[in-house]
Image: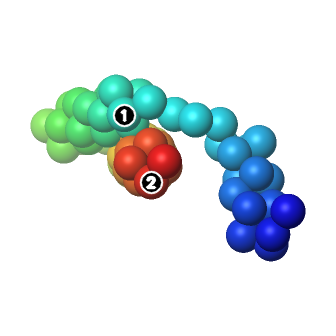
Amino acid sequence: MSDSQSQRTIWRSIVGRPYRWQGIAWMILGLFWLSIVATQDSQPWRWVVGVVWLALGLLWLVTAFSD
């Protein structure tokens, strides 16, 4: 097994094989959360949660499209 294939196998064991709709769902959740936070006076941790959900969705989409 080559180094590249070994790294890919390790990455798959950690991340799995996400579907595109899962990445889109995480991003929609993050956008929805951020839109609610933006319309209210809120605490900073809520902004962080929304950004994390967006980042997770983007990561899942990139992983799904790279397969």
For the residue carrying disc 1, how many other residues have a C-alpha within 10 Å: few (<14), some (14-19), or many (20+)? some
Q: Residue at x 44, y 43 (%)?
A: 64
Q: What whole-number distance in Å separates the C-alpha atoms at marks 2 and 1?
A: 11 Å
Mark positioned earlier in the residue sequence (2 or 1):
1
Identify the residue under disc 2: 66
Q: Is residue 37 visible?
A: no
Q: Quadrant of residue 21?
A: top left
Q: Nearer the viewer, mark 2 or mark 1?
A: 2
Q: Quadrant of the N terminus?
A: bottom right
Describe the element under mark 2 as helix, strand or loop: helix
Describe the element under mark 1 as helix, strand or loop: helix
Is 47 placed left or right of 56 in the picture?
A: left
Between 56 and 17, the one nearer to me in the picture: 17
Identify the residue under disc 1: 20
Give the percent coordinates (x, y) of residue 47. 37, 48
Which residue extends farthest front?
1
Which residue extends farthest bottom?
3
Is 30 placed left or right of 12 in the picture?
A: left
Q: Residue at x 69, y 45 (%)?
A: 12
Give the percent coordinates (x, y) of residue 29. 32, 29
Q: Amino acid at mark 2?
A: Ser
Q: In the displayed structure, would residue 38 be above or below residue 36?
A: below
Give the percent coordinates (x, y) of residue 20. 36, 34
Is 17 placed left or right of 13 in the picture?
A: left
Q: Residue at x 72, y 70 (%)?
A: 4
Q: Amino acid at mark 1?
A: Arg
For the residue carrying disc 2, how many other residues have a C-alpha within 10 Å: few (<14), some (14-19), or many (20+)? few
* Disc number for residue 28: none
Between 47 and 25, the one nearer to me in the picture: 25
Which residue extends farthest right?
1
Q: Is residue 63 visible?
A: yes
Q: Residue at x 79, y 53 (%)?
A: 10
